[in-house]
Amino acid sequence: MQAHQIVSSEAKFSECALLLGAFKDKKGEIEMVGEIKLGLCNPPEPIYLYVKNGEVSGESYLWYHYDINNDKTIPVQQRALSGYLQNLRLTSKEFKGKDNMKLDIIIAADELYVIRTGIETNFAKTFLLSVSQIQDFSKPLIIAAAPGEENVVFCRLYDAATKTRIRCEWNKDADWAEIISNIQSRLAGSSSDVPLPQQQTQVLRAVVPPSSKPSQDLRVKQIRTLLNYPVTSVIEWLRFQEVERPSELEDSQVDELVKSMCLFWAQDKFEHPSHVVSSYHEHVIEAVASGISEVTAVQAWMQNVQQSQQKLLN
């Protein structure tokens, strides 16, 4: 969570600089981002696009805006969005009593756009496979929605400058969490070179969390599901930390949550509590430190514990 701090004279100066169309870079220098247009305007909020192969009043569309106040779907006729990929964010939404993980694709263009789609959709997977091929995110991309059979929507990615399609091989068994983490790392390395849309600098910093955190939602969900840990217990733990989702926590806090879930699963499988901790440290912590994915390490640890139990029973 972001701590509330007393506004110092330096902070007030930064605020004034923002009002004048400037912002501080990482070196503390003031850089101009363009003049701010005064007068009537829309609130500086991101524009959300939702992916769906649908039809409204005989009008087909592949993505849409949603007017929550009037419970109304507003089709978007354009099938592509060009801009700079700023970040990926995972957001957990509850649907019919179950966790529903969404992938937010954050694009800086004439406005700040957020393409929101289910993490398990073909659109999300084809986007992730395509964007994983990119090394340089300082250049604009074109993200296009392409219809498939029935209600399926795929993503096609293009280099905006050359209009060439960025192709990839389909892999239904891809490690999506690893792909997202790798993309976020590359985005963090190139973010200082990406030009931001005029008047969006302050909004972008408020909306987009640090690139290392969005995957924490998926991380906790994967481990919780693997351990069959009660979702209500996770919610209670998060409430105690005064947050709604793991991505709002520090990395060390999420580490503790994962550890707590694992130790809870193993607590009745060892003779002494200290054996549980040492086993977890040896088979999970050290395995992850050596480069093995956390999910793989936890799976192997669980199998090792269960096999040891079986030997004792025999």
Image: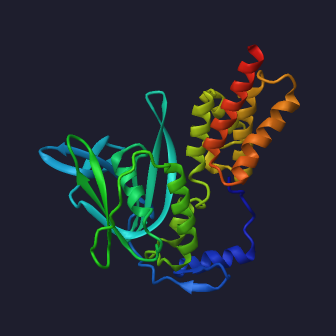
Q: Tell me what residue is drawn at x 27 percent, y 63 percent.
A: 80
The relative height of residue 266 versus residue 109 in the rendered view (above or below) is above
Horizontal side of 103 relative to 290 (left or right) equals left
Does 274 appear above or below 59? above
The answer to whether residue 242 is visible is yes
Q: Residue at x 77, y 21 (%)?
A: 268
Quadrant of the drawing holding the C terminus = top right
Q: Quadrant of residue 161?
A: bottom left
- Find residue 183 and report its horizontal and vertical position in percent: 51, 62
Which image quadrant for residue 12? bottom right
Query: What sort of colour scheme is used for the picture?
Result: rainbow
| Residue sitting farthest toward the top | 314
Judging depth in this view, the residue of 52 and 201 nearest the camera is: 52
The spot of residue 249 in percent (x, y) is 67, 49
Q: Is residue 84 above or below residue 118?
A: below
Q: Position of residue 296 (x, y in %)?
A: 61, 42
Towards the viewer: 296 or 228: 296
The x, y position of residue 128, in whole percent, is 42, 56
Is residue 250 at least partly visible in the picture?
no
Q: Nearer the viewer, residue 145 or 18?
A: 145
Q: How many marks?
A: 0
21 relative position to 105: left or right: right
Q: Residue furthest left?
A: 58
Quarter occupied by residue 186: bottom right
Q: Is residue 59 left or right of residue 245?
A: left
At a point 72% along the width and 77% down the height, the residue shown is: 10
Front-most of residues 147 and 293: 293
